[in-house]
Image (spheres, rainbow, N blue to C red):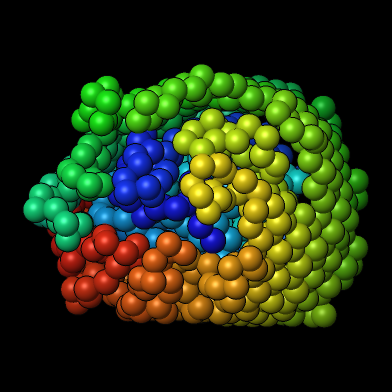
Amino acid sequence: MVRAGDVFNGFPVGQAVLCHPVFMGIVMKKAILFGALIVGAPSVPAGASEESADIILRPTRTADYVDNTTSPVTVVDEKTLRTQPLTDAASIIEQNTSAHVARSGGAGALASVFLRGTNSNHTVVLIDGIKVNSPVFGTAAVQNIDPSMLDRVEIIKGPRSTTYGSEAIGGVISMTTRRNWNGTSGYVDAAGMNDQELSAGVYHGKNGIRLGLNTSYHDTDGYRSSPSSDEKQGYDRNSYHVFAGSDFGLIDLEAGGWGSDGNVEYYSFGDLSQDYQEDLAYVKGTIDWDYWISTSLRWSQAGTSIDQDQTNFLGSYDYLEADRDEFNISTRVDYQTHSFALGYNFTEDNVESVSFGIFYDESDTDEAYYGQANLRWDRFSTLLAYRQSDYEDFDSQDTWNIEFAYRFSDQLRAFAGIGTAFRAPTSTDKYGFAGNPALKPERSRSAESGLIWSADNTMVSASYFHTRIDDLIQINSSFILVENIAEADIEGIELESQYRKGQWILTANLLWQDAVDEILDEKLSRRPDAVLSGYVSYLTDRHEVTVGARNVSSNDDSSFSTLKNDSYMVFDARVAFNARDNILLYVQGNNIFGEDYQTAAGFNAPDRTIKLGVKVSL
């Protein structure tokens, strides 16, 4: 589906291209902002601690055990994150799920995640419960999230607007940063060859007090990602994460921040570059009134600035400044095996932008009320959820979820669910080139069902899903106005499997999907019919070996051309050796066989890259 913001979604940008140039009558709409939205801090089940390995955020705003979910959840744990050949947060999704990632170049270039065939701005991304989707465009810049700062990633599939509001049509990607809940630890990791990387962190947790500081640096000269350019497109990034908190018994408080800044070079009718900076600060607290009732509060302020290094055709510099303030309060009640939650969320977005002569300075608010019930009996469980979101610029949006799960035995359970979701028009949709302030939200209806079988060392799941999206936002045929004129129908089958025994870990993920533009009667752009991914790891006290692979079928690149992205198969690998108890030597290779391919037409994927590194644990 080619939407107003997706027309040339493949251009290589770090956070955003602030330009909307008109060239030969074709609009190149390209603006992405890495915003941040705080959501309510999840409560954990009674008797469990937040660091428990089998606790997940689940498809609701509350935490629960993995086996209690009423829909499939993919969990990437700390060991997997430390031993996989990762390059950024987008590569976590590529190597551990069947979602497709379309990249517009190398490091720092736009990485668009297509979860279950939905658009790239139909997936919510969270960092420590903080929503990092852009208020300007709706996507999250996952290419700028450093995997070394993460401890855990959960991929929750299906509609989740009842919990997370706008954009949660395809699902939610929840990332948790590194922490130490019991003791003091730290590390220094340095690597080089094709890229230069340095990261370090120190963490402390004892007697209810927790502290942490993580910082990282990444620099690369890049490569010729565009055949039209004679220059390499480089990238540099500085990131940090800091937090401090304490459990006072009745009340638990925490304050923290996250930030990233850098420069990304890209090609768009010439060699261009831009500087970006993102900062986020938050304060959150949880009040445990009793063992069965708790209240969570969170406030945040996030800011983003992007400055184009070259002038536009008017001789001025494009820029973007945006900030988001949010307050959330929720209360959870546990009764026997059931739990209930009620919450209130208020968000205000302010955006100022100049893009090729188009200036706007606008704000919007969203006031939402939501509730959910997680009911569980011996073999049967259900989720009931409802949300009403009241935006300043359009009518309120009602969304809901109804899900069921039934356990036939200790090994086999079935699940089924239906739900609705929405995506609110962004500031670019409303006020950018061909913008339309009268736009309505995009709306979806989804259904899924499946089976999960798990034994001592093995897990296998199979699910069928069907999503219908109406009022999709798309620029009209005359390229003068953005309108709600598109529809999409998506159905597919997902198979996931994992085997763990001794030192061995084997996974495989398969997606077959049929994603169709109902109006044009053609395949949605960059939605391959089939994606196969997986990895094999052999891990001992002294050695770590991981080999990952992904095979993606051919797919249409854009409704504006007949270009296709050919099928490809890529292998990545990482080998590590413990020279001493606290010193790890490793070598990592990505695209180790040098596959020549493109995931976005006109932008070459990286050739073979090698990284040599040493990690010292403190």
**Coordinates of residue 123 in the picture (x, y in percent):** 57, 52
238 to 116, vertically: above or below: above
Quick one: 494 or 96, which is closer to the camera?
494
Left of 166 or right of it: where is 508? left
Res. 115 visible in picture: no
Q: From the image, which quarter does the C terminus lie in?
A: top left
Quick one: 151 or 206, which is closer to the camera?
151
108 to 306, vertically: above or below: below
Q: From the image, which quarter does the N terminus lie in?
A: bottom right
Left of 549 or right of it: where is 602? left
Numbered circles on residues, count: 0
Q: Which residue is drawn at 38% across and 30% down?
A: 355
Quick one: 157 or 429, which is closer to the camera?
429
Q: Which residue is drawn at 36% across and 55% down?
A: 10
Res. 476 visible in picture: yes
**Coordinates of residue 522 in the picture (x, y in percent):** 55, 73
Residue 156 position by quadrant: bottom right
Left of 145 or right of it: where is 154? right
Q: Residue at x 26, y 30 (%)?
A: 312
375 to 498, vertically: above or below: above
**Coordinates of residue 311 in the picture (x, y in percent):** 23, 28
Residue 370 position by quadrant: top right
**Coordinates of residue 86 in the picture (x, y in percent):** 33, 58
Q: Residue at x 83, y 66 (%)?
A: 404
